Amino acid sequence: MHYNHKPIFPARFMWGASSAAWQVEGAVNEDGRTPAIIDLNSQTKKPYTDNSIASDHYHHYKEDVRLMKEAGFTSYRFSIAWPRIYPDNSGVPNQLGIDFYNNLINELVSNGIEPIVTLYHYDMPVWVDKEFNGWYDRGIIDAFDQYVRTCFKEFGDRVKYWLSINEQNMQICYGKWLGVCKNEDTWFEDQWKINHIMNLCHAKAVIACHEMVDNGKIGPVPGYVPIYPSSANPEDQIAAMNAEELTEKVWNDFYAHRKYNGFIKSYWKENNIDPDIRPGDLELFEKAKIDFFALNCYRSNAAKEAKIDETAQSYELNKSGVKGNLIFPVVPGVYQLVENPYVETNDWDWEIDPVSLRYMLRYVWDHYQLPMMITENGYGAHEDIAEDGKVHDPERVEFLKTQIYQVGLAIQDGCDVIGYNPWSFTDLLSTGNGMAKRYGLVFVNTTDEDLRDLKRIPKDSYYWYSNLIKSNGQDWGE
Ligand code: BG6
């Protein structure tokens, strides 16, 4: 469908940007915070820097919020670090941790910026990991419930948009990379037990939010990679549907319908998998009615039939930032992913596909009829300060321009989209590439090798985005 006019964004659309505590805050040993599993995970990603200082947002939050305000932000999506709130298992929350988030939230609200808060973005406290063997033991459910209830109690008077678990599907699909998997030999079955425990935590958070926060709204944050069939061969279409189920639809159906779908139940049966569903679990799910979908989307994939006798291949992400190092997965008898000749890629071989946003929004709206907000979308690149002292990022401007335009088209198509918060506001650590892969609208002057002065320098994309959002999506620039 082609429209003869520019897309029109709704009034009160939430324009902002996004971050996560462990990637942006630093100050990992300050004010009572104890280590998180992701701190340890980030230390293993050498030669990239770890999260002990990151972008030092902990000490720069006022300046960062000022830059948001100047850009015209009406929202900011960030996460709370669980080990700042509960540094140990004493059951007593850490007042200094609570104070930090109160200060940040107050700063946002007084500047007219709506806080959108993720409860879990990979920073499980090490004490929780030790006591409950990470996500493997149901003991974590009560610890998580205690933590989220404290967040709702302390911040729920000002925070009305809550996100439960960031990219649960990606944590399962990339269990080893994100530090969730503890035993690769048994992961094929373990992942579904862990996923079930995560679902119980998600459900508890949804229920507690509705109980405790006046007008509180809460949703999940799937990591979305739309999957197209690589050809019109009907078997490729089924392969794309299989990939879609096993990487995202199983989760999205669960969140929206509050029960496991037929595809996954049959998959478990076929593969002799027992996800360890216990009495009362399904009844709990039934009560966890979400209010919206928060969607993270950076790229798309193309799928092709994989015959049963093909050799299995696991997905190997490009971790070097040198094009051509990604290895696509082959799941015999189910699907394989292949290169898509119709889209460009970035240095990490991620597809640059603006239309995937429109596709995703249409798909999710058609399936679930729930409001949607984009909570991540962005362009990762090698960058530094230019000779003129500025940071020029024309590729990011182009990326944002083309991607946001497609969000606008999806809105014209009838989708209920309530906000756009790209990744990321300032530069922050990439999950595997430290500061070498930058996403920010604002440059942070530090590198993996050299801790510089951490100065904030708005990039060209910051100014472009600012003009767009101040005009509520009308001023697209040149
Ligand atoms: C999302 C995560 O999957 O992708 C973020 O929620 C992450 O935490 C982002 O940083 C980009 O991925 P990466 O690996 O380039 O940092």
Image (spheres, grey):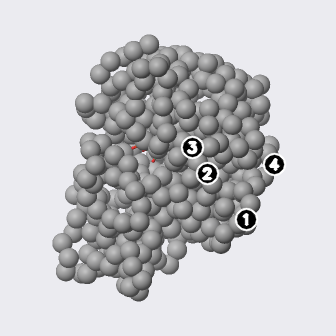
Gap in angstroms between the C-alphas marked 3 and 4: 19 Å
The mark lying in front, picked from 4 and 2, is: 2
Displayed quadrant of residue 299: bottom left
Give the structural element (helix, strand or loop) at label 4. loop
Give the structural element (helix, strand or loop) at label 2. helix
From the viewer's side, name the closer residue of 89 and 348.
Answer: 348
Q: What residue type is labelled 2?
A: Ile
Question: Which residue matches tag 1?
Answer: 4
From the viewer's side, name the closer residue of 101 and 222.
Answer: 222
Question: Which residue matches tag 3?
Answer: 422
Where residue 169 appears, x then y in whole percent? Answer: 45, 57
The mark lying in front, picked from 3 and 2, is: 2
Q: What residue type is labelled 4?
A: Ala
Q: In this view, does 56 lie to the left or right of 191?
A: right
From the viewer's side, name the closer residue of 171 and 147.
Answer: 171
Pointer 2 local density, CA inside 10 Å: few below 14, some 14–19, many at least 20: many
Pointer 1 local density, CA inside 10 Å: few below 14, some 14–19, many at least 20: few
Outermost residue, bottom side = 234
Gap in angstroms between the C-alphas marked 1 and 4: 21 Å
Gap in angstroms between the C-alphas marked 3 and 2: 10 Å
Question: Which residue matches tag 2?
Answer: 404
**Residues tagged 1 and 4 counted as in contact (Cβ below 8 A):** no
